[in-house]
Image (cartoon, rainbow, N blue to C red):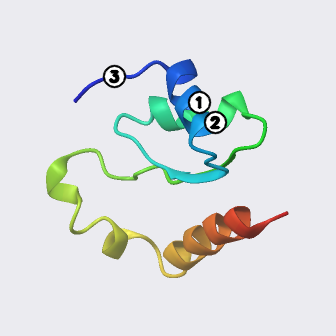
Amino acid sequence: MPHIPLEQVLALFRQQNVTGILATSRPNDGTRALVETKPRGLRVVFFIRPYRVRADIQTWLAQLPQGVAEKIAFRNAEQLFKR
């Protein structure tokens, strides 16, 4: 998987008039970098994957305590549509 420098990614978003993204990465470093940069004119809604290994992909959501998944989904949606 290629690694593209953050500034190059942000430049590409600007060129394509991208104003918002749902960001996720594994490891989470790329997502954190996008969020921490707080790029002007780009809304970044992050989703940090809570699983550590590929085998957890299918089951991590079911392992959360009741109500946590709904709160995560709501907070991400709230951030996405916040003005």
Secondary structure beneath label 2: helix
Residue 73 relative to residue 83: left or right: left
Give the residue drawn at x 47%, y 31%. 30
Q: Nearer the viewer, mark 3 or mark 2?
A: 2
Which is nearer the eye, 80 or 41?
Answer: 41
Residues at circles 2 and 1 in contact by the CB criterion of under 8 Å: yes
Secondary structure beneath label 3: loop
Identify residue for label 1: 10
Is residue 46 shown to the viewer in this render? Answer: yes
Secondary structure beneath label 1: helix
Give the residue drawn at x 55%, y 79%. 70
At label 3, the amino acid type is: His
At label 1, the amino acid type is: Leu
Q: Alpha carbon of mark 2 to alpha carbon of mark 1: how far?
A: 6 Å
Q: Nearer the viewer, mark 2 or mark 1?
A: 2
CA neighbours of label 3 inside 10 A, class few (<14), some (14 to 19), many (20+): few
Q: Quadrant of the C terminus?
A: bottom right
Residue 80 relative to residue 51: left or right: right
Residue 60 relative to residue 46: left or right: left
Give coordinates of residue 60: x percent, y percent. 31, 64
Q: Nearer the viewer, mark 1 or mark 3?
A: 1
Q: Alpha carbon of mark 3 to alpha carbon of mark 2: how far?
A: 19 Å
Give the residue drawn at x 73%, y 34%. 38
Identify residue for label 2: 14
CA neighbours of label 2 inside 10 A, class few (<14), some (14 to 19), many (20+): some
Give coordinates of residue 81: x percent, y percent. 73, 69
Q: Earlier in the sequence, mark 3 or mark 2?
A: 3
Q: Quadrant of the N terminus?
A: top left
* 55 vs 39: above or below: below
Identify residue for label 3: 3
